[in-house]
Amino acid sequence: MKRILFTLTILITSSGFLCAQLTPEVTSWVINPDTAVNKGYGGIPSNVQLVQYSTGYVYISCTCIPGYDIGPWPGNPNTPANQNFVYKITRSPQANTGALTAVGLGHVGVWTNGVSIFNASDAMTYNNDGVWHRNAYYFEGPGFDNCLGHPQQQGEYHHHVSPTCLYDATDSIHHSPLIGFMFDGYPVYGTYGYINPLDSTSGLRRIRSSYQLRNITQRDTLPDGAAASAVGPAVNSSYPLGAFMEDYKYIPGSGDLDSNNGRFCITPQYPNGTYAYFVTVDSTGSPAYPYTSGANYYGVVTASDIGMGSGHNTITESTTTYTPNASSGINELPATIKYELYPNPTKDYAFIYFDPSNPNNMKGSLYNEQGQLLQQINNLQPSISYTLDLSKYASGVYFLHLESDQVGVVEKIVKTE
């Protein structure tokens, strides 16, 4: 199927230079344009409410509630609640040259929509022995919602694995978008990256974890071969291989990523290269251990974001509020809106991919030839693919209006039998 790239001029133009300070850790967030209107679960304002930045840090104010529908959570008595987080992300991440900081329990990073990233553990061990750590995807996975998230005891909604409703994890045509930041300031990407990490022309592939299941039937040794101080359950139908984090071993070179589940590479947002984490899935699209990050952070961690009661930073320095398309008094409008829409004509579905250069929080409205509004999709984001269902409509001509606060375009779509 041939894809056609449409470049449409904006309806309102202006001149100006992009502020040099507006780098991805400032501009990549899914910002709620109107918290009084855009509500998520339980009527709580969704996504990120405020982004403020200084020379050294960016501060992310969020409720931990996404803009997409969440729930239910079978067998989970907890419900999401407003967390009122203010996360503090360094703008100059540094590799940790000393003892690495362990990726502990609770939030270890934040997705671009303000929802928390958790590691692979469900915070419990077999027989409370402190040795065999339970894999959240195995033990808690049946209680995940369709977006593969769930709330913990205090109502903090989070994802241990790839957040399927935040981006299109199956898109193998484009480099996966930047979908979060770990608390050492390094970005988190989706499932697809460049084959050669330093060559954007090398093609794309699913980025693979270097953690592999061990070949064991008894849980009496640890991944490094040492005897376990407490024996875990035998590998059986109740506790299959993979149920515990110690069932996996990091094997250098067996995948694309290091023991932290990251690598140094170039990306669309960092053409000069950066260390980056990747969420990992297997060839079937199912989450692949360690899912988000390994046992340790690669970089130096912002301590106020980790540990019990963390994530409620008080801003004590002068900051600038980032407003998409209007920050710091400097116009940031793109010169064009770029997207791919295919197939067109279509019999049933049309697929839309928005280029990373587009503004956040666009709106899509589908009209028929009589001008009747048929569908509306809010909070469309750059770097994400969307599906437009036309199967229930009669054959004919339809018009898709795409708009943001400053930009508007119209695309004609032909529906055939």
Image: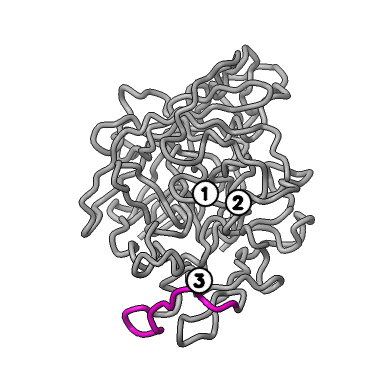
**Few, some or many residues within 10 Å of mark 3 (<14, 14–19, 20+):** many
Q: Sequence order check: which comes first, mark 2 or mark 3?
A: 2
Where residue 395 appears, as percent x and y from the top left, is 34, 53
Asked if the magenta segment contains residue 391, the reply would be no
Magenta span: 226-239
The image quadrant of residue 172 is: bottom right
Cβ atoms at labels 2 and 3 below 8 Å apart: no
**Few, some or many residues within 10 Å of mark 1 (<14, 14–19, 20+):** many
| Residue 128 in view in this figure | yes
- Outermost residue to the bottom: 217
Residue 4, label in figure: 2
The image quadrant of residue 233 is: bottom left
Badge 1 is on which residue?
341
Label 3: state its secondary structure.
Answer: helix
Asked if the magenta segment contains residue 227, the reply would be yes
Q: Distance between the residues labelled 2 and 1?
A: 7 Å
Label 2: state its secondary structure.
Answer: loop
Does 128 sit left or right of 241 as displayed?
A: left
Q: Which colour scheme is used?
A: one colour
Q: What residue type is labelled 3?
A: Glu
Question: Front-most of 308 and 240?
Answer: 308
Badge 3 is on which residue?
246
Where residue 80 appears, as percent x and y from the top left, is 28, 41
Where residue 393 appears, as percent x and y from the top left, is 29, 51
Reply above or below: 253 against 119.
below
Which residue is painted at 57% across and 44% down in the image?
A: 182
Query: Which quadrant holds the N terminus?
Result: bottom right
